[in-house]
Amino acid sequence: MQAFSEMGKTALEPGALDTKTKELIALAISVAVRCDPCVTYHSSAAQRAGATRDEVAEAMGIAVYMGAGPSAMYAAQALEAFDQWDEKAKG
């Protein structure tokens, strides 16, 4: 856990992206992957990093888009696979 914590600290250090932007990204990913503890942690960290409610709301729009879009693609692939297996079973 200590190594994971160190990796997180390093990842969130300002670089090409500032810490606030990185926390908004982390928060959006937390929502997209549906991690409740992550949402709590990164919403707090985004607030501490200076994110505004409008910035969080905009990041949430991306999170919903990304969480739902991949799910829709997987659903389409699952149906296609089912159809192929069904066809094969019927001969």
Image (cartoon, helix red, strand yellow):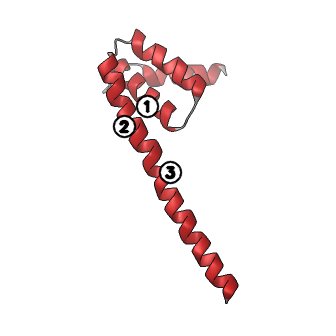
Q: How far, Cα to Cα, is label 3 from label 1?
A: 16 Å
Q: Nearer the viewer, residue 22 or 81?
A: 81
For numbered disc 1, what is the local secondary structure? Answer: helix
Depicted 17 relative to depicted 88: above or below:
above
**Which residue corresponds to mark 2?**
62
The answer to whether marks 2 and 1 mark residues whose Cβ atoms lie closer than 8 Å is yes
Spatial separation of the CA atoms under disc 2 and disc 1:
7 Å
Q: Is residue 81 above or below residue 49?
A: below
Q: Amino acid at mark 3?
A: Ser
Mark 3: few/some/many CA within 10 Å (<14, 14-19, 20+): few
Kindly identify the residue that appears in the image at 43 percent across and 31 percent down: 28
Left or right: residue 15 versus residue 42 is left
Which amino acid type is marked by label 2? Ile
Q: Which residue is mark 1?
A: 28
Q: Which residue is mark 3?
A: 71
Q: Is residue 61 left or right of residue 35?
A: left
Quadrant of the rendered image containing residue 91: bottom right
Q: Which one is nearer the viewer's eye here, 1 or 26?
A: 26
Q: On residue 85, which mark appears?
A: none
Which residue is found at the position 53% from the left and 59% from the top?
75
